[in-house]
Amino acid sequence: MPTRERVQAFVAMVEAGDYVEAIRQFYTDDATMQENLGIIRTGRDALLAAEDIVLKTVQITTRPGTVFTVDGDRAAVNWVFDIVLADGRKYPLDEVAWQHWRGDRIAQERFYYDPAQRKPE
């Protein structure tokens, strides 16, 4: 079960833009990630590879002031990201990550957001 301080450390790392290192330090070896009803990615190595691909195609900035809550082995985090595509178009993405922690690491994470937000300007 994570402490509030452990989740805060995770949030701080993501807010600092250190997305890959956050996966390394805060996810279990067999962690899963899913966006809305999309394909479930399994295994920290697969999560790292997917994150690397995303970061090569877009620029992501996490807005400060992230709100989160912890209840036992569950945490919910409300992220707001600013996404800039390779062609310079951008859009904000407001999502909630629902996490199941095993000890002090994330074992399962599912992101919920409205895909309509993904309309670059």
Image (tube, grey):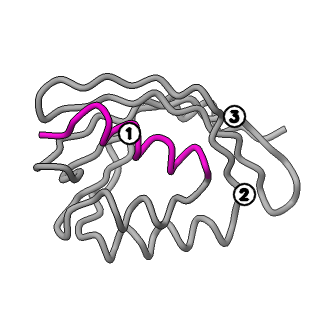
- 27 is higher (above) or lower (below) than 113: below
Identify which amino acid the numbered label 1 is placed on: Phe
Q: Secondary structure at mark 3?
A: strand
Q: Residue at x 38, y 39 (%)?
A: 111
Q: Residue at x 72, y 57 (%)?
A: 59
Q: Earlier in the sequence, mark 3 or mark 1?
A: 3
Identify which amino acid the numbered label 3 is placed on: Pro
Residue at numbered disc 1: 111
Residue at numbered disc 3: 92
Q: Earlier in the sequence, mark 3 or mark 2?
A: 2
Viewer-side residue, 104 vs 46 = 104
Give neighbour class at mark 2: few <14, some 14-19, many 20+ (Cα, 10 Å): some
Task: Look at the image and tell me in which quarter the C terminus lies.
Answer: top right
Task: Look at the image and tell me in which quarter the N terminus lies.
Answer: top left
Number of numbered discs on residues: 3
Splitting the image into 4 quarters, where does residue 46 fall?
A: bottom left
Q: Residue at x 52, y 59 (%)?
A: 19
Q: Secondary structure at mark 2?
A: strand
Instruction: Tell me where residue 107 appears, x and y as whole percent.
Output: 18, 53
Q: Residue at x 27, y 59 (%)?
A: 27
Instruction: Tell me where residue 50 appears, x and y as whole percent.
Output: 45, 69
Query: Where does the magenta region start and end?
Result: 1-16
Splitting the image into 4 quarters, where does residue 85 fall?
A: bottom right
Asked if residue 3 is among those painted magenta in the image, a careful observer would answer: yes
Instruction: Tell me where residue 78 appears, x and y as whole percent.
Output: 46, 27
Give neighbour class at mark 3: few <14, some 14-19, many 20+ (Cα, 10 Å): some
Asked whether, in this view, residue 36 is left or right of residue 119, the answer is left
Residue at numbered disc 2: 59
Identify which amino acid the numbered label 2 is placed on: Gln
